[in-house]
Amino acid sequence: MIASSYTGIALALLAATSYNVGLIQEKRALGRMPTLDLRRVPRVIASLLADPAWLAGFALMLLGLGCQIVVLTFEPVSVVQPVLASGVALVLVLSRLVLRERLGAVEFWCVAAMAVSVILLAASAGGAGGGAGHHANPGWMAAVAIPSAVIGLLVGASPLRRRHRVLSAGVCFGVGTGLLYGVAALAIKGLSGILVGHHGDVRIVTGIVSSPYLYVLVGCSAAAMLLYQVALQSCRASIVVPVSNVTGSMYFIIAGTWLFHEHLPASPAKLGLRLAAIVVAGFVLVTLSRQAAEEPGPGPAAVPGFLADQGRQ
């Protein structure tokens, strides 16, 4: 059990690294593109697919998602998702080194906090009561996922409907896309059950194609990805990515652990470590959100650019 948990944590770290390095690569590519206009979605998609640098980042993100699906077949949500949230630390470092975004004292403390969260999580691995679940009640899944996706769309698209400061827009984009990606993660968890419950390539492929989880995953991921591209192009990656990652992580931990009937560690000591790791991840989200809301920025910004034209009319 302990060896399996450590393997799961290592694979989750690989998923987080691949996914977030891909995001930074996308951010660099988006900086060289014309302003994206989500009123012309086909043109946006064509622009993205025509850029080799953006495609390289997207491929890394897909690799990270693939690793996430695999690790969720044998590890519980409460182990996997805080590790995925540790990608926040990597994004903050890379946004400073690669994107030259200023990393303030608060961001440095957030990096340290996420490192502590991963250490606590590793210490909580193993023991009885920590098995992975693979099946959720469809009715409860719909009751949780549908309102969450709607709220994510409304919050994530709010900077497109009205003028925001750049920093507050980054928080809205982050929270909205985080909820959408959280719902997509629930769908990934549902698909992981097909990998466990079916044997043989044909049965696995048939099970995946016929599962509603596949279409929830594609729909929520597509909506979140488009919003994310606008967010990365117009806002600081060091705000958008951490808020999105931690929002999605906390949502997935709470909803996924309950929906898939997973149990926290039976040992009081390991349970305390596991809960402390989750609390630390939540604290990072609150801290970054408050900082983004309070930090002075340029005047009300057009996010994206076409809103500026609307504001001047």
Image (cartoon, rainbow, N blue to C red):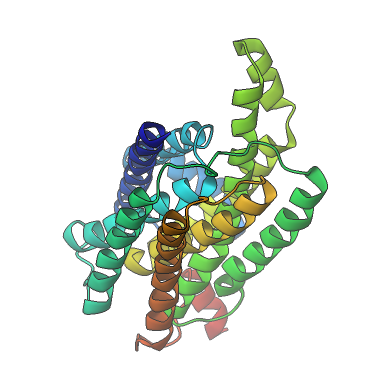
Extreme residue in the right direction: 139
Specify whether 82 is left or right of 139. Answer: left
Q: Position of residue 237 (x, y in %)?
A: 35, 63
Q: Determine the residue positioned at 54% across, 60% down.
A: 177
**Foreground of the two, 68 or 226:** 68
Would you say 124 lies left or right of 151 here? left
Q: Position of residue 227 (x, y in %)?
A: 53, 59
Q: Residue 101 or 63: which is nearer the viewer?
A: 63
When the figure is inspected, residue 206 is found, relative to residue 142, above or below; the finding is above
Q: In the rendered view, tell whether residue 69 sits above or below residue 274.
A: above
Q: If the image is split into quadrants, where does the N terminus sit?
A: top left
Q: Position of residue 102 (x, y in %)?
A: 21, 72
Which residue is painted at 20% across and 63% down in the image? 96
Question: Is residue 311 left or right of 214 when viewed as pictured?
Answer: left
Residue 260 position (above or below residue 111): above
Residue for point 23% across, 70% down? 108
Rendered image quadrant of residue 85: bottom left
Residue 166 visible, this angle? no
Image location (x, y in percent) of residue 292: 39, 80
Q: Nearer the viewer, residue 220 or 265?
A: 265
Q: Work out which quarter of the rendered image holds the C terminus and state it.
A: bottom right
- Location of residue 254 with respect to 263 vertically, above or below: below
In the displayed structure, does residue 53 sit left or right of residue 256?
A: left
Count of picture labels: 0
Is residue 265 visible in the rendered image? The answer is yes
